[in-house]
Image (cartoon, rainbow, N blue to C red):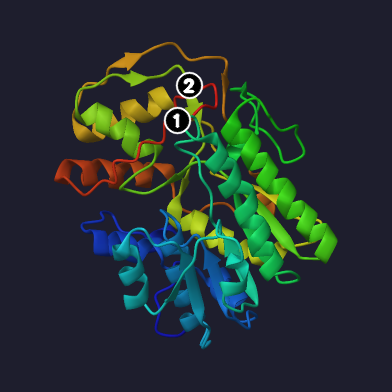
Amino acid sequence: MGREAVVSHEADLPEEIESEEALDELLTRPRAALVELMKGVTGPLVVLGAGGKMGPHVSVMARRAAEAAGKRLEVIAVSRFGDRRARAWLEERGVRTVGADLLEAGAERKLPEASHAVFLVGQKFGTAADPGRTWAVNTLAPSRALERYAGRPFVALSTGNVYPLVPRGSGGSREEDAVALSAEYGASAVARERVVECHSRRDGTPAAVIRLNYSVELRYGVVVDIGRRVLGGEPVDATTGYLNCIWQGDACDMILRALGHAASPPCILNLTGPETLSVRALAERLGALLGRAVRIEGHEAETALLSNPARAVELLGPPPTPVDRVLRWTARWLERGGRLLDQPTHFEVRDGRY
């Protein structure tokens, strides 16, 4: 199936990830279903917001899947590219880059042509200090992108933060459940979804809205946040005692494959792991792997931010990377002093203020 390695099942996963190069290779390694999808993408495929934490991996995974499918598909990464290293990293891996700021008037006229678009632009942290910018990023930017790519399959990344906290034994919020408008970030994320819906209905643009929580890899995420505290002998706050998460490689794969389910009005999918995970249990497992005593503070609240991904699992299959494998990778990474992004998730926040 071309020159690219393709993940097919758990046996293809390494026991340990020893370097950032190996980590990025795994995070961008395509699976057979994505390779098959890419056979029908005429291109170019544009990834907007490609300079963030997920964008580089989504872009390179798409490029690798196309190569494995034997396609000469151009993948174009669009971003402000505040981090020049991300831009160089993409170009070294065969992805063309375009610098653009979607908050600039007329920015949509500068965007490249595309047959399909994946939209990853968004702002969460810093909302409490500058809510106006968060609302602008989360509404004006998708509107301008959808003007440019009207009628083309369009996947827009959203967040599980659109939901209220729900009882820990509920199985999580479903796509048809009521959204929450009590905090600036969650409300602006709902507004972003409404913008996508408006353009999709008006222009007939097939779209998919992906409500993600939480994507994890070895340099950042809720597992790293908990693991760092355990390794450092710091207490782990268990008040927000339950969560969902998904390995970032699985999330990138499913975001791209959602292009095959874009519709008008938009298809909405919760994207996360199907297990309701206990923060206490995660800390204890990481403590065992790291050989550290675990200090727990707080008592588990009756509610948490939880999503039910049954619809995504039905359409795209279950995320194949087991949580315990991620825990083992993370523990070893932390022990070895692997590079971290120092971007905490603040999963403990219960009032939606970031």
Label disc, if present, on residue 347 of the rendered structure: 1
User: Circle 2 is placed at which residue position?
Assistant: 240
Which residue is at the far left? 336
Q: Horizontal and vertical percent for residue 74?
A: 51, 82
Task: Name the element at disc 2.
Answer: loop
Give the residue drawn at x 26%, y 46%: 340
Q: Are marks 1 and 2 in contact (CB under 8 Å)?
A: yes
Q: Which amino acid does label 2 sit on?
A: Thr
Is 75 on the left-hand or right-hand side of 205? left
Q: Indicate the quadrant where residue 174 lies.
A: top right
Q: State which tag comes first along the sequence, 1 or 2.
A: 2
Q: Which amino acid does label 1 sit on?
A: Phe
Which residue is at the far top? 299
Q: Horizontal and vertical percent for residue 4?
A: 40, 79
Q: Of residues 169 and 211, which is closer to you in this image? A: 211
Q: Is residue 159 above or below residue 23?
A: above
